[in-house]
Every structure is written in C-alpha cells, then in structure tokens.
C-alpha cells in the first residue's frame, strides 16, 4: 500500500474529476442549475441526483434513483476502506476495520426512528431494503396505523417497542361508557391491533438486524477461509463477494422456521388491523347513507354469478340452436340421402360453437351416462335436473 | 488469511471509471425513448372482460402447422416477457419454426374482478379461448403452452378438457409446491390467506413485487444497479435494461378469489401432489391427463425450483412424457440468447412430431 500522502493526493484528484464530470453534465442538461460541490463522492450523489433526474420520465427517474442509491453505497464503501488504507493500514486490516465499523454502526441502529433516518451512505442500509419497502407498503395499505405512531410521546423506533406501550396503555385502559361505548371499544380494539402489528413488525426488523450482524461475521470468516486465487482483487470483486455472502445468510434466514413465523405473523396482523378499520369506515358510511364496501361486495358477487349464469345459458341456447339446425338439415337431406348417402367423415360433429363449451369432457361423459341411465329407467325429469346441476357447476 | 491485493491507485481508478460510466449512462438513460411492450405484430381475435386473445402474424414464407398453439401465461406479471424485444422473442421464434401462435393476455384485474375464481379462469376464459381457436381453424384440438402459473392452469384445463387438447407444453411450472428449496411456498405457509383476501380484496401487484424482489434482495435491489453502470454507456444496453425494468415492475393485481384458491390449494395444501384438487366442482387428478406432455424447467430457477416442475413426471397419466432442462433461470428461459437458440426450436420440433 502506498503512503498516506499519496493516497490523499489520488483521492483528491479523483474527486476533482468526479465533480468536473458531473458539473459538465449538469450544465449540458440545464445551465440554470447550480450544483453544489461537496467533498464526499457519496454525498455528492444527492446533488447530482437532483440536478439530472428532476424532470425525467417516471420510469427513467426510478431507474436513475436506484442507480444513484447503489452508486452512493458503493462509493461509501470505497471511501471507508480508502480512509482506512490512508491511515496506513494493510488492505486486509483496512477491510477488517471497515467491517468492524459496519458492525458498530448496526449496533446503534436499535434506536432508529425509521429507515430513512439511517445515515446517508450507510452501507449496511442494504440489509434493510426488504424491511423499509415493507414499511412503505404497509403504511399505504393501512395509513391509520401510521397515523397512530405520530401521536405525541410515542416511541417510533423500528427496532424497539420501548415506551410505546405506555401511552397506548392509557388509551386502551379507558373504560367505555354511555352512548359511544361501542364505537369507543372499536377504536380501542383498533389501537390494540395496531400495537400488535407494530410489535410483530419490530420483531421482524430485530431478526433482520441480528442476521445482518451475523452476516458481517460471516463475511470476515469467508475472507479468512478464501484461498489467494479467489481473493477479491478489486473493489467490485469485494462488493460482489459481500453480496454473495449476504445473500447466503439472508437465504438461510428466509428459509428458516423463524422467518416463516415472523413474516406470517406480521402479514396476518397487518391484515386484521386493516380489516378492522375497514369495518369501522363501512359503519360510518352506512350511518351516512352512503354505499360501503360490504354492499359493493354483495352486488359484485351477485353480478359475477349472473354473468356465469348468462354465459351458461348462452351456451345452452347455442347448443339447442345447433341441434335444431342439424335436425332441420337432416330432414331436408333425407330424400337426397336415400339416393346418395354422405361419406362417414362428413357426419362427424363440428367443433363446438364459440360460446363456452361448459362442462369438462370427463364431467360431460359422466352426465351423459347418468342421463342415459335415468332415461332407461324412464325418469327423464330427474335426468334433466342432474344435467342442469352439472351445467351450473361448471360456472361458465 | 491470504493478502487482499488492493492498491490505492487501482481503487481510485476503479471509482473514476465507475463514475465515468455512470455519467455517460445517465445521459443515455435520460435520452431513452419510451419503452413499448411486445414487438411481434398481432391481431386481437377475441375479447371478454379484460381478457384479450391475440393471434401473432407469422413470418413470411414459413409454413405453419395445422394445429394452432395457445400460450397461457400466468396471472402474475405480463405476457410480453415472451415477446420482449426483436432478437429476444420466444413468440417470434415459435412463429419462425412453423407454429401458429395465439396468446391470452389477462389484462389488469380491478375490483370488479374480485370474485373471479379459478373455475372462471380455467373452465371459463381458457375454455372459451380454446373454442374460438378451434372454430377459427376448424380443428377439434389445439396445442397448449402454459407458462409458470399459466402452466398450472393448463395442466388443470388439459386434464378436464382432453377432448380439446392435442399436446401440452408446460414451462417453469410449479407442480410440487412443497419442495424444500421453494422459498415462495415456505413464506406463505403461515399466512392467513383468508385474512389477506378479506382485507385487501384483490392482492396488490406491489405486494407481489415486494415478494419477488425479496427472494434475492441483494442481487435484485442492489447488485443489479451497480452492475448496470458497467453497461449503460451503450444505448442499446440501456434500452434492454429499461425493458426488463418495465416488465419486472409491471405487476397486475390478482383477483381476490382466484388468489385465495391458488395459494391455498397449490402452495399451502399442495393438492396437485397430495390430491383433492377441484376446479369448479370437478376433480383434477393428473393421472387422468393422457395427452402428450413436454415439461420444460430451468436449472437455476429461483422462483420455481427444478424439482417443483420435475414432480410432474411421476404424477401425469400420459405415456408420452418428455422433459427438457434449460441451463438458466426463470426469466432467462425466455430472454437469453441461449434460450432463443434452443428452447422454441425444441418446442416446435416436439409439437411437429405430434401434430
């Protein structure tokens, strides 16, 4: 490894190139924009992101965001290792120190109020992409639980339930009285369900935190075990190895009974919570004489069944018409047939009409047999009922 | 521990190179034209609700087989994966190899479709599409190619309607949903599907995206974008990358009732293997499936592990069963250059011998 001064010079030079390249681009894109020049490459990404991505198409902007996000993480990794190298450490020691720094950083995460509050450029943030994405999705699905956590005095840690129980405890313990007893109890139940979901979410996040720390240890072990041929020689190779090790640790965790239980519990509790508030809103709409989702569901169910019945009847009508048409054709063809019989192949039935063919072949055969049997025992009405039942079962 | 051969000057050069690629790539990204989906010309021949049945235009000079081929895609994601770009189109390749190709596009279900069941999809929509094709061609039977979840639907359909199916091809189709390496299945075992459907109505596509990306989060949410920087200085690569991005995040919602039944019957109770599957009141037992079957799976499939597909061999009643293994992944089997050269020709060849 070269000496500290040489590293600092190279680093400074490279950063200058970075700033120049992006400034040129920003000027080319929009000369009016002022792009602040920052010292750190990873921080600089924020500025360039705003400068070049602001007015692009949504799909392009999304891809750009992801590239910038990952670029920033990648640069932060280089910066950390680079600084350790600049302190005069050997590469092995520099990487080891970087991993220790990551581990220490993670241990401080337990009091974070949200994934967005993780320091910009914190490399281990990638471990919490699933949790962060889940939280964003959950808050869209059940915004009421998100609102609850904005109440004064609430602990908003994503890893630690902490004092959240205390303020909620007071809400939950208030006795329901008088005319508004029932709605109050429903609201209390909602708060209870929100608390249960939050607890399940925190347990899920805590497990990720634990596995993330373990993955760093796994990475250190891997570097110890790896032979010199396979040892990463570039930053990219080091990053790819980190991805491989992290993915392996994650996969082991994701395939564990623990993950299955934590994930299942978190999803189920969110759904119960969502349904509870859904029902509360439905009740409110009913009181306002407005259509609610229960009523819409009932109508949809009825319409769907009507559509199935309609299709089945259309198909039946088409079959009857085809049958009548054949009979008519056969009658008309009879005198001619006497003089010149049609070849056997022409008598083969044509493919079914466009309307739904209805009962599957296996079932139709069974229905035919049953009908024949009943006809033989002179119970045509019963055979007809059976056939109709079979048809309605096809649902099409 | 071996020494890590890092050098500070190389580290800096690497970052400079990365930065240069990124800045060039951003320019290309910003200049990328809007991505269109599907490349092969086609005509709509039937529509019902949100479903559209397309027939693809054959290449000039190619003699087409007499038995048309219907592609039944999954409800998850969009079917243009099979026709994603000019030189990466399974459909184009099938056409070039003499297949007369139809495809069901399920569209984007919304709240009005919440009560669609698997019976509606399989004995309803698919059956009516098959009838449309049979009538257009004046044939009694068609060939069916089912993809992923569409493969499961095709297995059920072909078992119940064998009088209309000449040959069945299944691609990356989950049959045994409880193989030990099936992460998707592992995740849903303790999920209360009734609670999900009752709360959500339809299952949002965003939730499916979250699930699929989390099968390999470091690769799919991180490494992919770092590696992208290596290739985006080339405009063509940028366009191809954006096409795949569009497809990955283009996830229709899932009709609630169909989703409820699919996850419970196939993923939680594994009924194709364990038995007891019923679609619209009709028992589906793969032992009754007698039509010729070509089962294609991908060796590195992280969504449908090979064993999940290979399980079909022991379950199917057909005496004419063939397996084809592809050395790639769940998506690569449609879009990789290697797949283009091998998979569609193999399908066409297998079908020609049996049509």
Image (cartoon, rainbow, N blue to C red):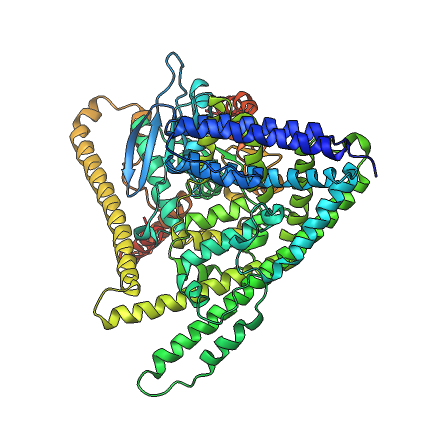
Residue B310 seen: no
Judge left or right: residue A311 versus residue B95.
Answer: left
Q: Residue A236 location, x and y as percent?
A: 66, 33
Q: Residue placed farthest to the top in the image?
A: B61
In the displayed structure, A108 sits above or below A67; it is below
In the displayed structure, A180 sits above or below A55; it is below
Instruction: Locate the C terminus of chain B and report the quarter of the image it occupies.
Output: top left
Where residue B187 sits, quadrant-wise, is bottom right
Judge left or right: residue A294 versus residue B263.
Answer: left
Where residue B47 sits, quadrant-wise, is top left
In the displayed structure, A175 sits above or below A329; it is below
Instruction: Locate the N terminus of chain B and report the quarter of the image it occupies.
Output: top right
Front in this rendered view, residue B95 or A69: A69
Front in this rendered view, residue B297 or A2: A2
In the displayed structure, A286 sits above or below B155; it is below
Front in this rendered view, residue A90 or B41: A90
Judge left or right: residue A90 versus residue A252.
Answer: right
Q: Residue B27 location, x and y as percent?
A: 45, 27
Number of marks: 0
Where residue A157 sits, quadrant-wise, is bottom right
Front in this rendered view, residue B304 or A252: A252
Residue A342 seen: yes
Residue at (78%, 39%) from the top-left corner?
A: A89
Q: Residue placed farthest to the bottom in the image?
A: A178
Residue at (40%, 58%) from the top-left corner?
A: B200
Judge left or right: residue B202 versus residue A268.
Answer: left
Q: Residue A196 location, x and y as percent?
A: 51, 69
Q: Residue B304 location, x and y as percent?
A: 57, 41
């Amino acid at each position: 490894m070269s000496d500290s001064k040489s590293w600092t010079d190279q680093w400074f030079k490279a950063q200058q190139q970075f700033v120049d390249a992006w400034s040129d681009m920003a000027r080319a894109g929009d000369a009016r924009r002022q792009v602040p020049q920052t010292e750190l490459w990873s921080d600089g990404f924020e500025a360039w992101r705003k400068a070049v991505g602001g007015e692009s198409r949504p799909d392009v902007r999304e891809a750009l965001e992801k590239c910038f996000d990952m670029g920033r993480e990648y640069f932060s990794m280089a910066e950390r290792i680079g600084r350790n190298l600049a302190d005069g450490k050997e590469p092995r020691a520099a990487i080891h120190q970087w991993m220790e720094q990551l581990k220490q950083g993670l241990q401080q995460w337990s009091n974070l109020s949200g994934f967005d509050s993780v320091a910009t450029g914190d490399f281990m943030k990638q471990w919490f992409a699933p949790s962060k994405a889940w939280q964003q999705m959950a808050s869209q699905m059940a915004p009421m639980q998100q609102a609850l956590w904005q109440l004064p005095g609430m602990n908003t840690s994503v890893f630690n339930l902490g004092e959240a129980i205390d303020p909620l405890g007071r809400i939950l313990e208030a006795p329901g009285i008088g005319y508004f007893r029932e709605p109050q109890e429903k609201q209390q139940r909602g708060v209870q369900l929100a608390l249960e979901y939050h607890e399940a979410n925190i347990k899920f996040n805590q497990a990720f935190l634990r596995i993330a720390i373990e993955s760093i240890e796994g990475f250190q072990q891997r570097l110890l075990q790896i032979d010199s041929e396979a040892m990463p020689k570039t930053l990219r190779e080091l990053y790819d190895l980190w991805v491989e090790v992290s993915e392996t640790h994650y996969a082991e965790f994701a395939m564990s009974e623990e993950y299955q239980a934590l994930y299942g519990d978190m999803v189920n509790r969110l759904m119960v919570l969502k349904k509870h508030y859904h029902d509360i809103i439905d009740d409110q709409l009913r009181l306002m004489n407005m259509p609610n989702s229960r009523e819409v569901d009932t109508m949809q169910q009825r319409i769907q069944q009507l559509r199935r019945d309609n299709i089945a009847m259309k198909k039946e009508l088409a079959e009857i018409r085809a049958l009548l048409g054949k009979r008519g054709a056969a009658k008309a063809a009879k005198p001619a047939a006497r003089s010149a019989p049609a070849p056997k192949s022409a008598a083969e039935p044509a493919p079914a009409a466009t309307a739904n063919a209805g009962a599957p072949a296996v079932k139709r055969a069974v229905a035919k047999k049953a009908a024949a049997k009943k006809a033989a025992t002179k119970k045509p009405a019963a055979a007809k009922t059976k056939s109709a039942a079979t048809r309605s079962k096809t649902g099409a | 521990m071996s020494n890590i051969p890092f050098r500070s000057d190389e580290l800096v050069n690497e970052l400079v190179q990365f930065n240069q690629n990124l800045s060039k790539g951003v320019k290309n990204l910003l200049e990328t034209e809007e991505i269109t989906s599907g490349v092969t010309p086609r005509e709509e021949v039937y529509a019902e609700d949100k479903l559209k049945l397309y027939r693809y235009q054959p290449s000039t000079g190619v003699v087409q087989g007499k038995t048309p081929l219907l592609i039944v895609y999954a409800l998850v994601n969009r079917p243009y994966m099979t026709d994603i770009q000019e030189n990466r189109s399974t459909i184009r390749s099938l056409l070039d190899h003499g297949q007369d190709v139809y495809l069901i596009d399920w569209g984007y279900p919304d709240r009005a479709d919440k009560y669609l069941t698997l019976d509606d999809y399989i004995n309803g929509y698919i059956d009516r599409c098959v009838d449309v094709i049979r009538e257009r061609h004046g044939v009694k039977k068609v060939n069916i190619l089912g993809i992923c979840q569409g493969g499961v639907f095709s297995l059920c359909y072909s078992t119940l309607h064998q009088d209309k199916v000449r040959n069945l091809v299944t691609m990356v189709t989950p049959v045994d949903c409880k193989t030990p390496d099936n992460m998707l299945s592992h995740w849903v075992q303790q999920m209360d599907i009734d609670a999900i459907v009752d709360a959500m109505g339809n299952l949002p596509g965003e939730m499916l995206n979250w699930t699929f990306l989390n099968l390999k989060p470091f690769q799919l949410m991180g490494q992919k974008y770092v590696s992208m920087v290596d290739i985006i200085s080339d405009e063509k690569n940028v366009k191809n990358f954006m096409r795949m991005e569009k497809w990955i995040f283009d996830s229709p919602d899932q009709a609630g009732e169909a989703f409820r039944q699919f996850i419970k019957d196939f993923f939680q109770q594994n009924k194709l293997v364990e038995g007891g599957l019923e679609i619209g009141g009709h028992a589906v037992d793969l032992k009754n499936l007698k039509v010729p079957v070509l089962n294609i799976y991908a060796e590195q499939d992280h969504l449908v592990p090979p064993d999940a597909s290979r399980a079909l061999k022991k379950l199917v009643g057909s005496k004419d069963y063939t397996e084809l293994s592809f050395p790639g992944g769940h998506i690569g089997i449609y879009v990789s250059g290697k797949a283009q050269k091998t998979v569609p020709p193999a399908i066409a060849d297998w079908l020609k011998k049996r049509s």
